[in-house]
C-alpha cells in the first residue's frame, strides 16, 4: 500500500507535530492562570484551606512540568555537528526584554506603583524566561558531562545552594538553580521513554502515584494549618523556590541541618504529579490543541490582568455572593483561550522573526 493511501494519524498533524505536547502545554498554562487567580484566597478563612490546597498542588505541578517539557524540546539546540542554535535563546531574550519593559511600564503608569525598573530583576514572575535563557547558555557545557553525573549534581545544587542567604531573586538565580533538575530531566529523556509515560501501563501506575502525591499535599496543608502564617509561608516558599532557607526558617526552631528536607519532598512530589499528569494528557486533537504552541503569549500577557487583579482587589467582588469564588475556574479558562488567539500571539510571532544573524555572524 502506498503512503498516499494511508489514513492520517489521529495523534499528529500533516507535518508530524504531535497533538499530545500541545495539549499538555495548553492545560499547564491554564493552570498557571488559575493558580494566580486562586492566590488571593489561599490565606483567607473558611474555604481558604481548600484554595491553599489547590494552589499548592497546582504550583507543585505546572511550572516543573512546563520546564520538563521545555527541556525535552531543547534537544535540537545543539546540532549533530556540535554547533548550537543560538536563535532560540536569542528569541527568549527578545520576549523577556519586551515583557520586562511593558510590565514595568504598566506598573508605573497604569497602576501607579512605586517601582525601580531593572533588567536584572524580572517583573511579575517573568523568571521563567530568564531561567530558559540561563539554561540554554549552560547546555553547551552541560552536554559535555555524562547525565549520570550532571543530573545528581543539579539535584544537589538545588537542595543545598539555598543555604546561601545571598541566593536571592536577582536574575532569578534561586529558581534557575532549584528548577534546573526538571529542565535536565526533560533534556535527558529520550522520545522513546517519553512515549512510555502516556502508555496504558503508565496510566495504571500513575493512579496510585498521583493519589500519594495529592495526599501528601493534603496532609501537609491540614497538619500545619493550626501553626499559622509562619509555617504556611515556609511551605509556600519551598513550592515557589524563590527564597533562601535562612529567610524561610527565620522564625523557626528547626535545626539548619534539616532545612533541605522539605525541598526533597517538593522534588519528589513534583515528579510524581508531573508523571501522573503526563500519563493522562489526551493524545488526540481538540479545540484547544492549536493554542498549545502559544503558551508564552498567555504566560506574559495574563501578567497585566493579574497585577490589576491584585492592585485593584478585583477578587473581592467574588466574595460578594456565596460560592462566587468558583467562577475563578471558567474565568481563568476564558482568559487562557482569549490570550491564545492569533491577534494576541501575533506580536510574539513578530518578535520571533527577529534574527540574531542580523546583529552577529553565526554558523
Image: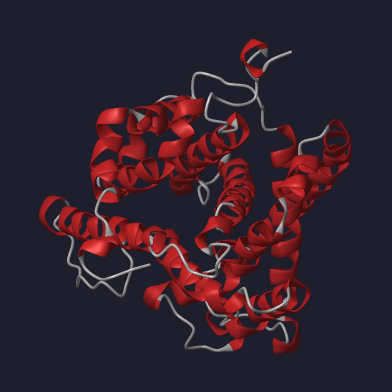
Name the residue: 66% across, 18% down.
3
Of residues 62 and 146, the one drawn nearer to the viewer in this rendering: 146
Q: Could you say where residue 164 lies in the image, as x and y percent from the top left?
A: 55, 89
Name the residue: 72% across, 53% down.
190
Is residue 210 positioned above or below 244 on the image? above
Of residues 335 and 348, the one drawn nearer to the viewer in this rendering: 348
**Left or right: where does residue 130 sit relative to residue 230?**
left
**Left or right: where does residue 156 sit relative to residue 92?**
right
Which quarter of the picture shows residue 355?
bottom left
Is residue 191 positioned above or below 153 on the image? above
- Of the 4 image quadrants, the one containing the N terminus is top right
Q: Could you say where residue 326 lies in the image, as x and y percent from the top left?
A: 50, 27
Of residues 167 and 181, the one drawn nearer to the viewer in this rendering: 181
* Coloring applied to the structure: secondary structure
Q: Could you say where residue 129 lies in the image, as x and y percent from the top left?
A: 40, 60
**Left or right: where does residue 219 sit relative to residue 16?**
right
- Of the 4 image quadrants, the one containing the C terminus is bottom left
Residue sticking out furthest to the front: 2
Name the residue: 55% across, 41% down.
28
Q: Could you say where residue 209 lies in the image, as x and y percent from the top left?
A: 84, 46
Residue sticking out furthest to the left: 109
Residue 130 visible from this viewpoint:
yes
Name the residue: 74% across, 88% down.
257
Is residue 234 positioned above or below 66 on the image? below
Amino acid at each position: 500500500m502506498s503512503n498516499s493511501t494511508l489514513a492520517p494519524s489521529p495523534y499528529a498533524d500533516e507535518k508530524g507535530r504531535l497533538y499530545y505536547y500541545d495539549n499538555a502545554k495548553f492545560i499547564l498554562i491554564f493552570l498557571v492562570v488559575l493558580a494566580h487567580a486562586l492566590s488571593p484566597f489561599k490565606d483567607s478563612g473558611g474555604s481558604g484551606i481548600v484554595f491553599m490546597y489547590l494552589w499548592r498542588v497546582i504550583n507543585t505541578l505546572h511550572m516543573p512540568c512546563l520546564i520538563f517539557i521545555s527541556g525535552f524540546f531543547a534537544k535540537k539546540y545543539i546540532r549533530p555537528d556540535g554547533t548550537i542554535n543560538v536563535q532560540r535563546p536569542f528569541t527568549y531574550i527578545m520576549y523577556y526584554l519586551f515583557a520586562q519593559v511593558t510590565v514595568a511600564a504598566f506598573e508605573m503608569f497604569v497602576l501607579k506603583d512605586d517601582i525601580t525598573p531593572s533588567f536584572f530583576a524580572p517583573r511579575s514572575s517573568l523568571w521563567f524566561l530568564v531561567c530558559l535563557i540561563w539554561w540554554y547558555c549552560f547546555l553547551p557545557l552541560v552536554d559535555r558531562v555524562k547525565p549520570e553525573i550532571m543530573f545528581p549534581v543539579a539535584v544537589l545544587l538545588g537542595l543545598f545552594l539555598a543555604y546561601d542567604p545571598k541566593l536571592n531573586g536577582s536574575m532569578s538565580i534561586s529558581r534557575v538553580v532549584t528548577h534546573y533538575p526538571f529542565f535536565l530531566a526533560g533534556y535527558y529523556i529520550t522520545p522513546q521513554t517519553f512515549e512510555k509515560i502516556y502508555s496504558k501501563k503508565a496510566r495504571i501506575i500513575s493512579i496510585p502515584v498521583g493519589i500519594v502525591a495529592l495526599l501528601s499535599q493534603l496532609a501537609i496543608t491540614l497538619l500545619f494549618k493550626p501553626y499559622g502564617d509562619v509555617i504556611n509561608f515556609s511551605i509556600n516558599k519551598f513550592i515557589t523556590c524563590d527564597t533562601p532557607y535562612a529567610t524561610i526558617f527565620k522564625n523557626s526552631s528547626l535545626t539548619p541541618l534539616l532545612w533541605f528536607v522539605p525541598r526533597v519532598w517538593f522534588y519528589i512530589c513534583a515528579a510524581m504529579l508531573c508523571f501522573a499528569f503526563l500519563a493522562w494528557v489526551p493524545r488526540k486533537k481538540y479545540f484547544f490543541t492549536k493554542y498549545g504552541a502559544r503558551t508564552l503569549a498567555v504566560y506574559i500577557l495574563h501578567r497585566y490582568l493579574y497585577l490589576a487583579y491584585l492592585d485593584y482587589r478585583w477578587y473581592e467582588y467574588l466574595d460578594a455572593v456565596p460560592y462566587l469564588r468558583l467562577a475563578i475556574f471558567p474565568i481563568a479558562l476564558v482568559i487562557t483561550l482569549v490570550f491564545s488567539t492569533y491577534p494576541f500571539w501575533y506580536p510574539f510571532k513578530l518578535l520571533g522573526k527577529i534574527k540574531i544573524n542580523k546583529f552577529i555572524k553565526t554558523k
